[in-house]
Image: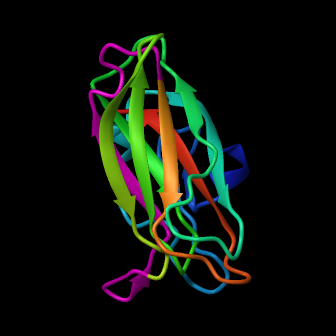
């Protein structure tokens, strides 16, 4: 199975391949792009839409919201959704506000902080994270993710984070 056969390709190093297994990719400088490990057998649901990007320009203040990203509810939603987030910034963590939408109102489901890529765990530099969200589709027909940078960005510190969803 080649990585070109993957069903979803966020800019990070985790791909769901046709055999249902997650593959971790190591880039040329030896950084492992994925921190959380998940058995392919535990992610039995399908991919929810396409991976989406959220971008921040260089030289901006902290707490600037990127353009919100939306995902439509899958045909048969499950109680738990895996959210795979790639944050390549070595400067700023990002805060994700996760909402469900019922057709007229947004309801906040969770707030999540995704660390900057420079976070070290047992000598492994990570830039991708797996977050399990329970009840994302309760009462809603879609979800919206609003992300903001937690630290002011200097010159040359622009970055694009990517989020992908999969049912568990």
The furthest residue to the front: 61
| Residue at x-position 45% and y-position 69% | 93
Looking at the picture, tell me which residue is in the foreground, 24 or 10.
10
Highlighted magenta segment, given as a residue range: 119-142
Percent position of residue 51, x then y: 62, 42
Report whether residue 7 is seen. no
| Residue at x-position 31% and y-position 85% | 122
What is the total number of numbered labels drawn onto the structure image?
0
Looking at the picture, tell me which residue is in the foreground, 85 or 104.
104
| Residue at x-position 50% and y-position 51% | 147
Examine the rendered structure and indicate whether residue 87 appears above or below residue 89: above
Q: Seen in the image, is 69 located left or right of residue 130? A: right
Report whether residue 143 is seen. yes
Examine the rendered structure and indicate whether residue 17 appears above or below residue 141: below
Looking at the picture, tell me which residue is in the foreground, 110 or 120.
110
Q: Seen in the image, is 140 located left or right of residue 65? A: left
Looking at the picture, tell me which residue is in the foreground, 65 or 141.
65
| Residue at x-position 50% and y-position 70% | 127
Percent position of residue 59, x then y: 69, 76
Percent position of residue 124, x then y: 41, 83
Report if residue 104 lies within the magenta region. no
State the image quarter where residue 137 is shown: top left
Q: How is the image coloured?
A: rainbow
Report if residue 135 lies within the magenta region. yes
Q: Quadrant of the C terminus?
A: top left
């Amino acid at each position: 199975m080649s990585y070109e056969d993957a069903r979803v390709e966020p800019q990070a190093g985790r791909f769901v391949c046709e055999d249902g297994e997650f593959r971790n990719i190591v880039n040329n400088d030896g950084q492992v792009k994925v921190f959380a490990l998940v058995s392919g057998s535990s992610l039995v649901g399908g991919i929810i839409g396409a991976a989406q990007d959220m971008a921040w320009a260089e030289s901006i203040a902290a707490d600037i919201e990127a353009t919100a990203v939306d995902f439509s509810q899958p045909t048969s939603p499950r109680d738990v959704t895996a959210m795979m987030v790639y944050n390549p910034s070595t400067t700023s963590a990002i805060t994700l506000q996760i909402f469900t939408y019922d057709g007229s109102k947004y309801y906040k489901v969770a707030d999540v902080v995704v660390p900057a890529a420079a976070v070290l765990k047992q000598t492994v530099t990570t830039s991708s994270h797996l977050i399990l969200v329970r009840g994302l589709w309760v009462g809603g027909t879609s979800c919206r993710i609003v992300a903001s940078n937690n630290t002011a960005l200097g010159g040359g510190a622009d970055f694009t984070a990517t989020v992908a969803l999969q049912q568990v």
